[in-house]
Structures are given as C-alpha cells and as structure tokens.
Image (cartoon, rainbow, N blue to C red):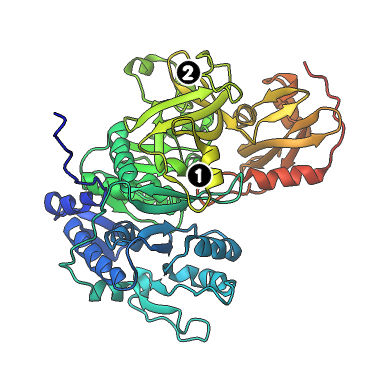
Amino acid sequence: MDQLKPIPAPQTPLNFLQRAAIVYGDCPSVIYNSTTTYTWSQTHRRCLQLASSISSLIRRSQVVSVVAPNVPAMLELHFAVPMSGAILNNINTRLDAQTVSVLLRHSESKLVFVDFLSVNLVLQALSLFPSHIPKPPLVLVADDTQGLAEPSESSSTVGLIVDTYENMVAKGDPGFVWVRPESEWDPMVLNYTSGTTSAPKGAVHCHRALFIVSLASLIDWSVPNNCVYLWTLPMFHANGWCFPWAMAAVGGTNICLRKLDGPIIYDLIQRHRVTHMCAAPVVLNMLVNHPKPAPLPNPVSILTGGAPPPSRVLLRAESLGFVVSHGYGLTETAGVIVTCAWKPEWNKLPATEKARLKARQGVRTVGMSEVDVVDPRSGLSVKRNGLDTGEIVVRGGCVMLGYLKDPEATSKSLKQNEWFYTGDVGVMHPDGYLEIKDRSKDVIISGGENLSSVEVESVLYTNAAVNEAAVVAKPDEFWGETPCAFISLKADVTPRPTEKEIIEFCRGKLPGFMVPKTVVFKDELPKTSTGKIQKFELREIARRIGSTSTRTSRL
C-alpha cells in the first residue's frame, strides 16, 4: 500500500464543457434576446477558439479581466479565459472609475474584455494609471444588436482597443488544445470582495475549489439535467456562485439577461419555461412587489442569499409559484456553502412557521467539511440553543487560497488549522441549523446590550407599507448607539406612514431597546449590484444626523 501513488489528474470545472459538448451537444446552451441561440457543441467550439486567441496575447497565470453584464460573452469567458491558461478576474460593472483603476492595477491585469456600455468607465479607469504602469489592451464586447462593429478610432481609444470579441472568436483555432492546470490547486479566478464593509480584497480560488462548489451546488439544490436557468444573479459576483460551470455539468440552458427588470423577468420565465434562478434579496423583493405578476407556467426554484428573506417576502413569493431556498456564502468561499436543507415533515407546518424555518441559513453543503459558530474570545463552539451568538467559521475545499498580495489580511481570516473566520455573527440551533444574526460590524451596541439589526429589519418588513428596510447604529450621547432605520416605501401606499407611526409599529413587536429611535425615509436604499444594501453609506448618514440623547424607556 505504501508504494501506491496518486495519478495526477487535476479536477477542474472546465472539464464540464468538454463533456457537455458530447452529452448535450444539440441541446441549447445559451439564449439571449431574439437573435442569439447556441448549442453546447457550439459553445464548446467558440470557447476553444476564444481561448486560442487569448493565449496568443498573454502568458500562463497572467490575469485577464472582464467588465460585462450577463451577456453570452460573459458566460463563454468563464471557460475561455482559464482554458487559455490565464486567471479570470470579473469586475463589477457598477463600480466607479477610481475603484476599477485600483483593481486593474492591483491584479496586474494584462488584458481586459469590456462591454460596449462600459467602455467609457474602463477608459477613465486607465487614464488614472500612473505613467510608469503600462495599460492593458482592451477587447470590445459588442452586444448582439451591435453586430461586429469595429471600435471607434477616437484619440481616447487608439492603441487601447485592439480587437472585438467576435473577431477574437472568429480567428481562433477550433482545434486548440486548452491549457490544463498542472495542479488542481493552481489559481483559476481572482474575485474582489464587494467592499460593503471594508476595502475590497482579492480572493484567489483554485480549480479544485470551483469544481467542488459547482457540483455541491447542483446536488444540494437538486438541479436536474436540461434545466432552464435565468441569469438574474450577476456573473461578476463570485462567478455567479459557480453556476456558469455548473450549468455545463447538467446541460442546462442559460437565459442571459443584460438588465434586471420585473416585467422582463416574468416574460422570460413564461417564454422559456424557466425552472431555476439565483436571486439576491433585491430581486426577490422586485418579483413579489410586481403589481400584476402573470401566473407561472411551472414552479420556479429560486436560490437566494445575503440577508435573510423576511417572512412576508417568502410567503408572497411562494404564493406566486416560486420555490425559495435560502443559502449562505461569501466571495471567499466561491459560492453557496450553507443551505436550508428542507425536511419533508416541515411541509405539514403552518405557513408562517415554514417561512421562519426557511429564513435560516441551514447546514453545510456536501462540499464543505465543517461549519461552526464560535465565541470570538475563547474560540470554543457556542451552545446549540439558538440564542448564544458567536462568529461563523467554516473549513473545507471551497475556501479561498488567500487574498492576493495581502498576507496580513489572509492570516487574520484563515487561522487555527485553516478555519476561515467570516466576520458574520450567528447562532446554532438545537437541530444543527445555522442562522445568521448580523455582520460583526452591523451589530448595534446600545447601553451595553448587543442587538441584531437583522431582527429589527425583519419586523420592519412585516409592515405592509415597507418596501426596503435597513437598520444601522446612530451615535448617541447617552446610550452610545441606538438603532436608526432607513426605509423605502411601496409606491402605491397611501397615506404614507410617518416616523412616529413606524416607531410605534416596532414598539408593539420589539423590546424597547431594539426599537428604532430614528427613522429616515428614502426613495431607494443604496445597494451594490448584487443587491446588498450598502450599510456603510447609511452609517455615514446616521453619523451626520448627529449624536442626540435619546433617553427613551428601555422596557
């Protein structure tokens, strides 16, 4: 036995594409608008051609960046870039030029694929490069309605835009032998964190991690072969939770969508009989608040993440025909690593109790080794009573290799036998199911007591007039911090509730110390492109409101 040695055959999700071309060759792989439809054999060939062209411009292990929405090119680049031997770096299209410039420089990107609507953003970002740092060349991704339009020859683009996407595909070699990883631990993608709570950091993931997350997500969500998947989750966010590769594994049809819009989403569901979609809470909210949703042609499974969906939203979504699953993951884990695995006996429970259970994050997926909640001071597991809070820690093959060029941040997050400390606060229930209570920076400490902003938000969402809600800490001379609620109201609500009425509404449902002392109404709450409410912006607004003493009775 001691003489036996493993045969080197690195696991990589890129293998899914080659298999899809054989098993699902004539099945649709991509549908976009009314003009673009590919089969899996066509997608395989296009990716090989594109990888061939990319490999002529870069060296192995160099970074290739992409700034694009959920268009077919974005899906193909998830395969073609790493198949060329490069490392894929997706950049959020809604970032400002300064941030994009920082990311391109930090990643040392050697080539940038840019959607035609984001060209000005990237050009502005490149203009901020110091003179001694070379600017990466650009490849223009034209929408299918734009045809093969050549890049303009204005002074700002000459020498920067070197080709168009479709030209790169057309001139590539369909017989290209793609560059396989030497080790499954080789880096494959570089993803920058959303920066909602801190400065962005670049999480590096290897082929092995993405292979594991892709398959674990399919198993845990019970995704069948030949499903129809609607792209409402941005692919630039943690690689769309690895579903670009996962869809190739099951021969799914990718319905690409450039822009989120309630009527368009419902139309695509009807037209293509969509079966699955991932949706941030903002999309879930958009669907349930649509004024006249059409009946669904079939049940649609939705995997949502981020903040726990309020019970009201879950109940409404399921009444429309959506089957909602709740998951938890981070940029540093490449996708969903905890899901609320549903037990058949729970189907007999009242709707409100089922909604409460579904709001929990749940248990680890099959791809994770361990998930725990620990006391940050002792490092020991908290009691499984659903009450004692601690920091959520995870360990397994889905965790990142580390942060690019940031050993200090890496050592702070990955410690004690490679446990990843998430910075999220949660509890463990007696049945072993995890529930997030807050981000560590979002916990409000008022009068020496910790209160969860998520719990206050859940109560606010039960108010029929509330469309969106977020609660942050506001400085207070007497209590230290008090809850400050930011709310957007539904458009058709009359009369509009006042600050006093919202506070009184909460007073009847929460302990006194958890009741918001300030309510700020906004037309829309600031969000990242993935639907996360940007609480750092709201905290700054709350800070500017001022530190006023609120000696409200704390019953």
The residue shown at (18%, 54%) is 18
Q: Residue at x 50, y 86 (%)?
A: 154
Q: CA distance from mark 2 to mark 1?
A: 23 Å
Q: Any mark on residue 118, and which? A: none
Mark 2: secondary structure: helix
Amino acid type, residue under disc 2 in the picture: Glu
Residue 157, above or below 393? below
Vertical comparison of 314 with 145: above or below: above
Q: Quadrant of the C terminus?
A: top right
Secondary structure state at the residue bearing disc 1: helix
Residue at 24%, 76% in the rendered image: 171
Identify the mark nearer the N-term, 2 or 1. 1
Residue 353, which numbered label?
A: 2
Residue type beneath disc 1: Met
Image x and y of residue 536, in percent: 66, 45
Question: Which one is in front, 92 or 1?
Answer: 1
Q: Which residue is mark 1?
A: 286
In this picture, is 488 found above or below 98? above
Residue at left offset 34%, top offset 19% = 343
